[in-house]
Image (spheres, helix red, strand yellow):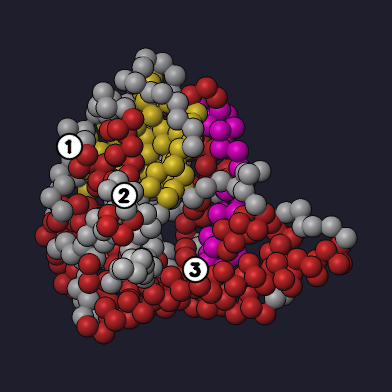
Amino acid sequence: MADEKVIDIPPAYTVVGKHDMMAKANHDETARFNYLVNMNKYLSSVLGAGNKLAYDTRVLPAFEKTHGRQPNHRHEIRRAMMLDPYHRLWSAMRRNTMEQRQQAGRSLVLRQIDELVEKAKSYNEGAETLVFDDSVELPRYVAGVDHHCMPGSYHTELFDEDVSAGANYDAGLFVTTGGALGAYADGGGQAVARWARNEHPDWQPKRILDIGATIGHNAVPIAQAYPDAEVVAIDVSKPVLRYGHARAKALGVDNISFVQMSAEDLSKFEDNSFDWVQTTMFLHETSNASMRRMMAEFHRVLKPGGLMLHIEQPQYDDEMPLYEQFIRDWDAFNNNEPFWSKLHELDLDEVFADAGFSHNECFHTGVRAWADPEIFPPSQTGDEEDHGRAAVWHALGAWKEGAPAASKEKEVA
Ligand SMILES: C[S@@+](CC[C@H](N)C(=O)[O-])C[C@H]1O[C@@H](n2cnc3c(N)ncnc32)[C@H](O)[C@@H]1O
């Protein structure tokens, strides 16, 4: 019998999790999303490999001839690759699929926006778990950027009670991640919760703060994993909070509140008032200076023995080849992620230490997104726990010194 081959195509949009707040996609919208998810996958895998070929066979030899040495920084590789026709074409196509994804999501959402607004109102009206504060200023690093080609980013309100930014984000994340975060695009939060429960089974956090929660993709599974905990999800952008609160209610999750607040000013929270402070794919969208202010706040509000955990793509360290650093930097220069490059070159342990965390209490580990078995069946990956093609992220954490928070063995990737 011939060897069984894994056909590496992304799952179809029809498996996306359909909760009550989710925008409903018709036949043509589903087809458009399926085209985009497959195009993204093709660009990152098959055509993406052509970039390395162009580098090895054309760009690097030309660089060596001109400079008499190899490139010594990812930016040198970027500047040389920008002149290569294959890379330019690939880059333009990738940028174009990002723009198409946003337009596909917006047209889906805006044609049914009245219905979505009414539905959100029915979940949100009178709820004490949705708190707005108009005195919160929108930071320039949010207001000034259409993140990953998202017109108006997370914060823009086209009219009163707008939820379109949140609904668009929810509808399209499955497309940009190729479904690798599972049906509800919550595989990161699920993985973090599994990590916490497996590595620290006696730890029972009572108050959890999720920062830059957007629509709660990753705060919700943490709230579900710790049903006795109170989860506070903060964000500066109103439309995503509005949508996120309604989405959590639609998913039947009640132990989470959505609060308009900036991570730079947590003064409404007492010192030592949270067991766990958490971010997921958030730090790369903040400026360097603001991140340092946030870290000091995270340290202040954490209880002694409490956990700070940040989920991001891997840092660029000496172990990571310069070519890989260059290709991972693509979003910074082509996909409206202006803080991405700087964040990934920082020594975050030093940043944590500057905020008051002890070096001895810092750790790095990897978390593999928990993508639903229906989407990535174990029979394809050969491992019940693995879900092989699901995204792997880097987790950087630090325990605040003080009374122990159950068992906390240091884990290094
Ligand atoms: C990339 S998204 C985070 C994704 C989200 N954590 C998740 O798990 O899906 C960044 C979010 O951070 C929010 N944000 C940016 N700066 C902030 C700040 N200073 N305080 C709170 N939220 C902020 C943005 O409004 C946006 O919703």
Residue drawn at (40%, 44%) of the image = 367
Q: Which residue is mark 3?
A: 44
Front-lying residue, 105 or 406: 406
Left or right: residue 290 versus residue 236 is right
Residue drawn at (60%, 73%) of the image = 50
Please tell me the numbered disc located at residue 383. Answer: 2
Q: Is residue 339 magenta?
A: yes
**3 or 1: tag closer to the N-terminus:** 3
> Seen from this angle, which residue lies furthest front?
1
Would you say residue 117 is visible in this rendering?
no
Please tell me the numbered disc located at residue 73. Answer: none
Cα distance, mark 1 to mark 2?
28 Å
Residue 386, percent from left and from top: 33, 49
Q: In the figure, 169 relative to 110: above or below?
A: above
Q: Secondary structure at mark 2?
A: loop
Residue 261, percent from left and from top: 36, 45
Please tell me the numbered disc located at residue 227. Answer: 1
Crowd band around label 1 with a 10 angstrom C-alpha radius: few (<14), some (14–19), many (20+):
some
**3 or 2: tag closer to the N-terminus:** 3
Front-lying residue, 360 or 1: 1
Residue drawn at (38%, 23%) of the image = 408
Looking at the image, how many numbered discs can be counted on the residues? 3
Name the magenta segment's main secondary structure.
Answer: helix
Q: What kind of residue is marked 2?
A: Asp
* Marks 3, 1: nearer the viewer: 3
Q: Which residues are magenta?
A: 331-357
**1 or 2: tag closer to the N-terminus:** 1
Q: In the figure, 207 relative to 57: above or below?
A: above
Residue 141, percent from left and from top: 51, 55
Q: In the figure, 407 relative to 44: above or below?
A: above
Crowd band around label 2 with a 10 angstrom C-alpha radius: few (<14), some (14–19), many (20+):
few
Can you say which quadrant of the picture contains the N terminus?
A: bottom left
